[in-house]
Amino acid sequence: MSASATESPVERGSLLAGGTRTRLLQAGPAEASEAVVFVHGNPGSADDWEGLIAAAASTGRRALAVDLPDFGDTIAPDGFEHTTIGYATFLGEALQELGVECAHLVLHDFGGPIGLVWVAMNPEALASITLIDTGILPGYRWHSLARIWRTPVLGELFQATATRPAFRMLLNKNEPRGLPRDFVEAMYDHYDRRTRKAVLALYRDTDDPGSAAPELTKLLAPRDIPALVVWGEEDAYLPSSYAERQSEAFPSADVHVLPASGHWPFADAPETVERLLTEFLAGLPESSS
Amino acid sequence: MPSTDSRSPIIGDGPAYDAVIVGGSLAGCAAAIQLGRAGLRVALVEKQPDPKAYKRMCSHFIQASGVPAIERLGLLEPMEATGALRPRMHMWTRWGWIEAPPERAARGLNLRREVLDPMVRSTAAETPGVEMLLGWSAERLLRDGGTFAGVAVRNREGEERELRARLTVGADGRDSKIAELSEVPVKTYPHNRIAYGGYFEGPPSPHSPDSVIWFLDPHWAASFPTDSGLNFYAAMPTKERLPEFKRDPEAALVKFLADVPEPPPIRDSRAIEPVIGKIDMTNRVRKPVAPGLALIGDAALAADPLFGVGCGWAFQSAEWLSDSVRPALQGEESLEQGLEHYRRRHAHELRAHAFFIHDYSNGRRFNPAERLMFSAAARDSRSAELMEAFGTRQIRPQQMMPRALPRAIAVNVRHALAR
C-alpha cells in the first residue's frame, strides 16, 4: 500500500489474551507502552490494517492490530461472549498482554462501539482516537443488513445463502467505487461459519448502538482528546452525517468526509486515509515510552 | 485607449450607432470587435470605469469549442504570448480516469481573467468604429414603437446620455439589466451546488499543464493550471457543505481538494489571494432576441459554471450574433431576419447542451444513462474520445448520443463478462 511498508515491515505473530489465541500484526518499537491500536469491524480482521500499521509505525510509534475472536483466523474459546462488552473486555486483555498502557485507537465500523466501550472502562489510557466510518451514534437506526441479521431465522437464512458471488455483489453494490477485488476476496475467506454466527450474536445483542452516546459524550468532551474523523461520504451503512457530530464528544476533532468513498475508505482511498492518519499521528505530542 | 468622453452627448432622432452593446466583458468586447471590423459604428458601454477591471468569480477555463472564435478575433497568439496554457482535459470518475488519446484530445485555454479581460477590452477599444464608454450604466431602453432603439446610460456623476442604435445588445451577464428592462421571456433552473475557488502558487499538479476535474458525484472539484505558474483550484460541492466553506473558505477548499482521489498538491501550495465563493448560481435561459435587441454570453444563457462553458460561449455567441446581424446592419437584409438567424444559431448550438447542464445542476447524482457512459469512457478510449469531445463542447449531445450510447452498452457488457 505504501512505501513506508518497506521501511516498517509488519510482523505477524500470535497472542494469547483472555483465553483466545489471536493473530497479531505489529510494527514499530515492540516494547513501547504507548501504541497505535487498530480495531476492525464486521466483516473484517487484523488484515484490514496491514498498510496503515506500516504507515503508523513510520511515525516512530508502535502500531498493532489483532483479530477479534471469531473474526479473521481467530477462534473464540467456548463461552466467549459475542457482545460489545465481551469484545471490549477482550481488547482490554489483549492490550494488557501486549503491555500497552496508552493507546491511540483507530476504529472502524463495529470496532467503534467496541473501542468506545473500552475507552469508557479506561478513559485515562486513551491518547488519541481515529474514527473511520464509526463513532458515537446518537439516534442511529440499524442499517437494513443489520436488521436482517438481528431477525431470527431470517438472519440465519441470509448467512446460509451468502455465497462468494452474492457476498461480492452485495458489498460492491453499496460501494461508490467498488472495493479492490483482493480486499473483498480476503474478507470472504474470513467470513466462515464461526464469523457468521458471531455476527448474528453480536448484532442481536446490540439493540441500540447509540444508546451510550450521552454518557460517552459527557465523559469524553471535557477531556478534548485529539481526534481524527474520516468518513466515506457515501457510506451505505453508517451515514456520513455522523462525521461532524463526533465533534460533540471530541471538540477538537479534525473531520474529513471523503467524497466518492464508501464504508471502507482505507480500501477505496488508501492513500488519502494513510496521509490523514500519519499526519494526525505525527502532529501529536511525542511518545512518552 | 480612446477617451470615453471624446464625443458630446448624442441626442436626436437618427441612430448614431449601428449597435450599442451594454457590457464590456468577454462577449460584449468580442461582438464590438467583430462589428467594428465590419465597418460598423459601435458604442460599447461598461459600468466599470477601470479599463483593467475583470471578473473575479470565474474559473477562467475556456473550453476548446471557444478557441476558434478567439483565434478569429486575433487574440489567440497574444493570449499565448502572455502565458496562456492550452490544456487538455482529464476527468476522474469512480470508474477511473477519462482521458482521450493525447493526439486526438482538444485543447482549451487557460488565462487568468485579470490578464484576459483587459486584453480583450483594449483590443475592442482600439478597433476602428468602436467607441468605449467606461463608467456608464444602462438606465433604460429607448424604443421606437415596438422596437428597441438604443439605451439611456448614466455615469457616476449622474450625467445621462441616450445612445441610439439600430441594434441594442445586452452582454451584461447573468443578472443582465438589459434583459430585465427588455422583459424578454426567461426560464430559471435551480442550482444546488456552491462554487469556491482561488489562485495558488506551488508545485505543479501531476497532469499540468492539463486541466483536471473530479466528478465526485454529486460533488465536483477542479484544478486549472494557468499563466504565471499559478493554479486555479475550485470546488463545487452540494449546498450541504456550505457551512464549512462559509466558516473558512480557504481551509475548506484546501481540505476538499486534498481529500479527493489522487489529489493535486494544494496542501503544498499557497493562496495568492483570498478564496472566494458563489452561492446562488440559478441558471437562466432567456430568449436571446427581441425586436431591435439581442442578448449574448451569460445574458442569453447563464449555465452552471460546473461545466466551464461560460467564457467559451461568450466568445462563440458574440461571433454568432455579429455574423448573423452584419448583413442586416450593412443594409443587405432586415434586422429582423438577422436576429432570427442569430436566435436559430444560438438554439441550434446550445439548446441541447443547456438542457443536460441544467438537468445536472440541481445537485443530483449521475443518472443511469450518465453512469453507463461515464463508466464506458473510463474503460474505453473511443468512448473517452467521444465524452471528451462532448465535454469540451465540440460536438452536441445529439451528435454524441447515437455514437456513445451503443458503444457504452457494448463496453460495459464486455467489462461485466470479463470479470
Image (tube, coloured by chain):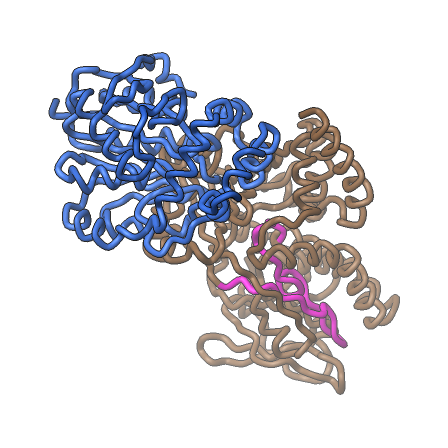
Q: Look at 50% across and 80% down and name the residue there.
A: B159
Q: Look at 32% across and 31% down and name the residue there.
A: A39
Q: Position of residue A247 (x, y in %)?
A: 27, 50
Q: Is residue B195 above or below residue A279?
A: below
- The quarter of the picture where the C terminus of chain B appears is top right
Q: Quadrant of residue B34?
A: bottom right
Q: Look at 20% across and 27% down and name the residue there.
A: A93
Q: Is residue B51 left or right of residue B22?
A: left
What stretch of residues is rendered in magenta? Answer: B280-309
Q: Would residue A90 be visible to someone looking at this image?
A: yes
The brown-tinted chain is: B
Residue B44 or residue A56, whichever sits in front: A56
Q: Is residue B79 magenta?
A: no
Q: Quadrant of residue A73?
A: top left
Q: Position of residue A162 (x, y in %)?
A: 56, 33
For chain A, the rendered hue is blue
Residue A22 or residue B317, whichever sits in front: A22
- The quarter of the picture where the N terminus of chain B appears is bottom right
Q: Is residue B277 above or below residue A259?
A: below
Q: Is residue B303 left or right of residue B339?
A: left
Q: Is residue A149 left or right of residue B387?
A: left
Q: Position of residue A216 (x, y in %)?
A: 22, 49
Q: Look at 56% across and 43% down and name the residue there.
A: B215
Q: Position of residue B278 (x, y in %)?
A: 46, 59
Residue B183 or residue A62, whichever sits in front: A62
Count every numbered label the image shows and give the total. Answer: 0
Q: Is residue B305 magenta?
A: yes
Q: Would residue B87 be visible to someone looking at this image?
A: no
